[in-house]
Image: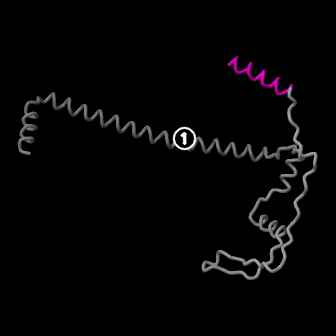
Amino acid sequence: MKALLKDIGGFLSTLTGIDILLYCAVLFLILLVVCLAYIIKNTDDEEEPESNELDLAKVVKTLEQEQEVPIVNHTSYEKEQEEKAIISYDELLAQSKNKNNYNYDEEIITNDDDLKIKKIDLTKKIVLPELPKDKEENSNPIMFKYQEEEEFLKTLKLFIQEL
């Protein structure tokens, strides 16, 4: 450790007054550049949210003024799906109670009081709803004709060759 201090002292003793002055000036300039970069970075960050807040306020005002419900033309399938859709857990439970004809013997509540377990009574007969029978028309799907398939394959081969 003493040797290191001797070496540093020897180095500093060889420097002239101008060398020390230039060394201090360079350190001062580096410190100044770092401080200026820090100040510029902080001032830019503060200005952006203010301008964004103004833009957001304008956007909110225009959206409030232009609140219109878009008119959507649904197909019959989409209307049917919308009517059958289950949106909440309560609706799901209500629909399941209407569909299931289960009879319960007893209800067991767990220690946490969060979970209720119901024991199904198997002595009574359960009436299950009948499934709709498929029509004979729907059971035979419409297939491509042989000529249409051949034309499709030919055009597909041409397309691949062009790539």
Task: Judge left or right: residue 7 versus residue 123.
Answer: left
The residue that appears at 78% across and 45% down in the rendered structure is 65
Residue range highlighted in magenta: 147-163
Residue at the far bottom: name it: 106
Q: Position of residue 47 (x, y in %)?
A: 53, 41
Q: From the viewer's side, name the closer residue of 58 and 160.
A: 160
Check disc 1 and report its element: helix, strand or loop.
helix
The residue that appears at 87% across and 41% down in the rendered structure is 141
The residue that appears at 65% across and 44% down in the rendered structure is 56
Q: Position of residue 124 (x, y in %)?
A: 83, 79
Does the stretch in magenta take in 149?
Answer: yes
Residue at the far top: name it: 162
Looking at the rendering, in which quadrant would you find the N terminus? top left
Does the stretch in magenta take in 153?
Answer: yes
Tell me: residue 6, above or below residue 105: above
Q: From the viewer's side, name the closer residue of 57 and 147.
A: 147
Q: Position of residue 81 (x, y in %)?
A: 84, 52
Tell me: residue 42, above or below residue 26: below
Task: Judge left or right: residue 161 versus residue 146.
Answer: left
* Dominant secondary structure, magenta: helix
Number of callouts in the render?
1
Q: Position of residue 147 (x, y in %)?
A: 86, 25
Q: From the viewer's side, name the closer residue of 133 and 1.
A: 133
The residue that appears at 49% across and 42% down in the rendered structure is 45
Tell me: residue 44, above or below residue 117: above
Label 1 sits on residue: 48
Circle 1 Cα neighbour tier, 10 Å, few/some/many (<14 / 14–19 / ≥20): few
Q: Residue 104: which quarter of the image?
A: bottom right
Looking at the rendering, in which quadrant would you find the C terminus? top right
Q: Amino acid at mark 1?
A: Glu
